[in-house]
């Protein structure tokens, strides 16, 4: 059985550590089960994979109509989360979680929670989402916004032009601010 731990910092975030089976041939691990997610969580419908070199910083992104489940089979990522949901009891809280091919942790990220990661090593990340790609739901907040309070542990970061130009939290347009009550609305 997997160990499912609710975040003590950001409501609705789950950290899941699956059971690992090892023998002299190697190891086996289930990386995802829908039943690990909350009962009312949408079904994951798309899987993605990305590789990143050490020092790559991705995000912070957020969605109004998408939830994510992240798993790192190779390497190590420092996952950064920030609750943007108006009306959430944890609105404004930030958290980091290290996930790796060594600890096998997965992270469930509800819509409205900004998320990104720093590749602490060369790495591969897989992520499942509950909606197909929708460019109008690809939103972001600046990774270096002091209000978020992240201390990135590497000095030489590689960041996309898109992520360098995300707005500060305080400058997110009102119509793009996630609401806690809209957690399980369907995409338009």
Image (cartoon, rainbow, N blue to C red):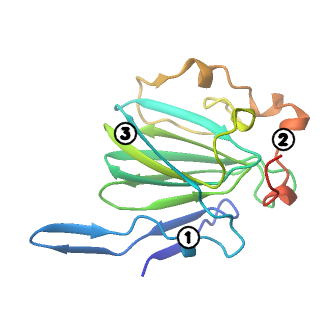
Give the left or right position of residue 97, taking residue 23 as reference: right
Residue underneath mark 3: 120
Residue most extreme to the right: 174
Res 140 visible = no
Q: Which mark is residue 34?
A: 1
Front position in the image: 16 or 51:
51
Mark 1 element type: helix
Q: Quadrant of the N terminus?
A: bottom left
Give the left or right position of residue 168, taking residue 32 as reference: right
Front position in the image: 152 or 165:
165
Image spot of residue 117 (x, y percent):
50, 41
Q: CA distance from mark 2 to mark 3?
A: 30 Å
Q: CA distance from mark 3 to mark 1?
A: 28 Å
- From the viewer's perspective, is the residue at label 3 or at label 1 nearer? 1
Q: CA distance from mark 1 to mark 2?
A: 28 Å
Q: Does residue 6 lie above or below 127 as drawn?
A: below
Q: Does residue 80 lie above or below 153 as drawn?
A: below
Image spot of residue 180 (x, y percent):
83, 57
Mark 3 element type: loop
Give the left or right position of residue 28, taking residue 52 as reference: left
In primary-sequence order, the first of circles 2 and 3 is 3
Query: Which image quarter: residue 10?
Result: bottom right
Q: Which mark is residue 177?
A: 2
Q: Are marks 1 and 2 in contact (CB under 8 Å)?
A: no
Crowd class of label 2 (few under 14; some 14 to 19; many from 20; radius 10 Å): some
Q: Does residue 179 lie above or below 141 as drawn?
A: below
Query: Which image quarter: residue 158?
Result: top left
């Amino acid at each position: 059985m997997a160990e499912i731990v609710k975040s003590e910092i950001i409501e609705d975030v789950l950290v899941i550590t699956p059971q690992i089976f090892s023998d002299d041939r190697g190891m086996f691990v289930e990386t995802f089960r829908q039943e690990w997610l909350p009962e009312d969580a949408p079904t994951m419908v798309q899987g993605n994979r990305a590789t990143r070199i050490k020092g790559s910083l991705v995000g912070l992104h957020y969605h109004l109509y998408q939830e994510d489940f992240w798993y790192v089979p190779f390497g190590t990522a420092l996952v950064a989360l920030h609750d943007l949901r108006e009306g959430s009891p944890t609105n404004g809280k930030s958290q980091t979680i290290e996930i790796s091919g060594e600890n096998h942790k997965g992270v469930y990220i509800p819509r409205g929670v900004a998320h990104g990661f720093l590749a602490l090593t060369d790495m591969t990340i897989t992520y499942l989402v509950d909606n197909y790609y929708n460019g109008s739901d690809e939103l972001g907040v600046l990774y270096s916004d002091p209000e978020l309070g992240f201390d990135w542990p590497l000095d030489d970061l590689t960041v996309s032009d898109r992520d360098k130009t995300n707005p500060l939290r305080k400058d997110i347009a009102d119509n793009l601010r996630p609401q806690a009550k809209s957690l399980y609305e369907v995409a338009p």
